[in-house]
Amino acid sequence: MHKQEAGDGSPVDPMFRADVVAGLSRRPRAIQARWLYDRRGSELFEDITDLPEYYPTRTEIGLLDRSGPAVADAVGPGRAVIEFGSGSSAKTPRLLQAIRPASYVPIDISGDFLRAAAADLAQRFPDLPVHPVEANFMQPVPLPDVVADQPKLGFFPGSTIGNLTASAAVDLLRTMRKSLGEGAQLLIGIDRVKSPDVLVPAYDDSAGVTAAFDLNLLERINRELAGTIPVDTFRHKAVWNPGHERIEMHLEATRDVLFEVDGRQFDMGAGDTIHTENSHKYTPSGARLLLRAGGWTPVSEWTDDADRFALILAEARPHALAP
């Protein structure tokens, strides 16, 4: 049996193929947000984090800078920092400088991007062992043997947990607990509910970078799955869904369109959309409840002056049989 390849000769991820075909076949159409992050998508997302409308990154970085000493006191030295979905690790140096870790393990699904970022970080921290792991952290991830005996601190910044529905977020938190083990800590960034006047522009910027990030998914489908999607007939759309307290990103067809993906034919009418990403926002009590449901006990919390974003430290404590 021959391994199927994308148009550039690289192997096609069978999970990507299955998710895209299933997502385009269901109603309403939806494709998991994690497939937005191929190399080009990861690069575009890094550009998004520098946009004036995109407040989460600079707010969280400011929190890490300001609260670093308090985080260090709560965490203690000598931990292995395990970062889930590390991307370019733009926020990580703040944490590493503050807590004096024993090692750093970045985990990301985009291998090339991960290795480049890990190499850059290793240069910045030459005395810190860096062990990149290419993996889908939605499943339990075997950690490198060299960190087996080190206490663990999971790091999940960027309010990435907001990309998931509540049930999926709880599942992920439980998976992280399995990966890190009992007694581990988790430092997680969670975005707060706020005015749509602030939220919508953060996901539909005036420069069109977020639109390019969203539309890149269609480019990837065409490249890797022999797609014939006319990308120029789609537009990026971001809306606030108050019932679910989330921003939704969609790719909307601007006219009736017929196309193929992986040898299958699909059609969409003008105004039909492909739901590509959610970004759930949480109240303070909602965030703590989510963590507890995922097996983590919140122990400390830091927020910015405007109370727009929170860093929460939680612990994987033994399961209680009673209150």
Image (cartoon, helix red, strand yellow):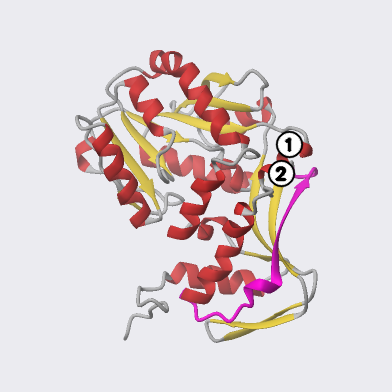
Q: Nearer the viewer, residue 275 or 229?
A: 229
Tell me if 78 is positioned left or right of 50 in this view: left
Point out the stretch of residues depicted in magenta. Answer: 224-244
At numbered mark 1, what does the secondary structure look like: helix, strand or loop?
A: helix
Q: Which residue does the image show at 46% across and 74% down from the upper left?
A: 224
Identify the residue under disc 2.
201
Q: Nearer the viewer, residue 44 or 4?
A: 44
Q: Is residue 249 visible?
A: yes
Q: CA distance from mark 1 to mark 2?
A: 6 Å
User: Is residue 121 depicted above or below 101 in this figure?
Assistant: below
Identify the residue under disc 1.
198
Q: Residue 125, percent across and down?
A: 25, 31
Q: Nearer the viewer, residue 45 or 161?
A: 45
At numbered mark 2, what does the secondary structure look like: helix, strand or loop?
A: helix
User: Is residue 59 depicted above or below 135 in this figure?
Assistant: above
Image quadrant holding the N terminus, namely bottom left
Q: Amino acid at mark 1?
A: Val
Q: Residue 26, percent across and down?
A: 68, 71
